[in-house]
Amino acid sequence: MTLRITETALLAYLKNRNALYYGKILELREVVEGWLAYVPQTFPHYTRHTVQHSDELVRQGSQLLFADGDPAKPVLALSAVEAYILAAAAYLHDAGMVSPDKEKAEILASEAWQEWTTGGGAGRNA
């Protein structure tokens, strides 16, 4: 059985420490889920950078930060703010990969892109 993200030690710890931050991280996850759904369209050759990838970082972080995956057994003292920042970092770490179609078209049509991919630029052989 797969552990639900809300049952991970990090999010359970956050919920116990500060319900407001816990609610905010769930809101952030929901918004980021929509953004990250666009990443495979721009980077189809990359591993899937969807919200499930970010969930996996929260799961793995929970294993590192809590003995036996138990939110009552942190391996170091974390404040609610620190727990929130760790979870937010997991969800936002790929946000820079989201690019609107208009921006992609502008980049691909730019002189700098053409030089990088066809001239002496490093992208020529990539």
Image (cartoon, helix red, strand yellow):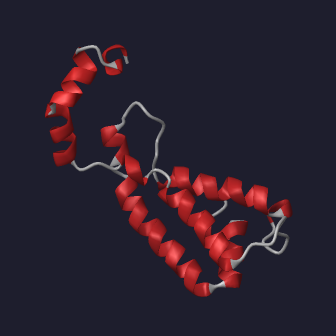
Residue 1 visible (yes or no):
no
Name the residue: 57% across, 80% down: 21
The image shows residue 73, relative to residue 16, as above or below, that is above
Q: Quadrant of residue 67?
A: bottom right
Q: Is residue 56 visible?
A: yes
Quadrant of residue 9 within the rendered picture: bottom right
Lateral position of residue 96 relative to residue 76, left or right: left
Left or right position of 108 against 19: left
Quadrant in which the N terminus is drawn: bottom right
Q: Is residue 80 above or below residue 2?
A: below
Task: Give residue 20's position: percent from left, percent from top.
Answer: 56, 86
Q: Please tell me how many numbered marks the rendered image carries.
A: 0
Residue drawn 46% across the image and 74% down it: 27
Q: Quadrant of the C terminus?
A: top left
Asked which quadrant contains residue 120, the reply is top left
Residue drawn at (77%, 55%), measured in percent from left and top? 64
> In terms of depth relative to the viewer, which is nearer, 105 or 37?
105
Left-right relation of 14 to 92: right
Q: Position of residue 17 (x, y in %)?
A: 70, 83
Query: Could you say where residue 3 lies in the image, as x and y percent from the top left?
Result: 67, 61
Vertical placement of residue 27 versus 95, above or below: below
Q: Residue at x 50, y 53 (%)?
A: 93
In the rendering, at what x and y percent does residue 16 appear? 71, 83
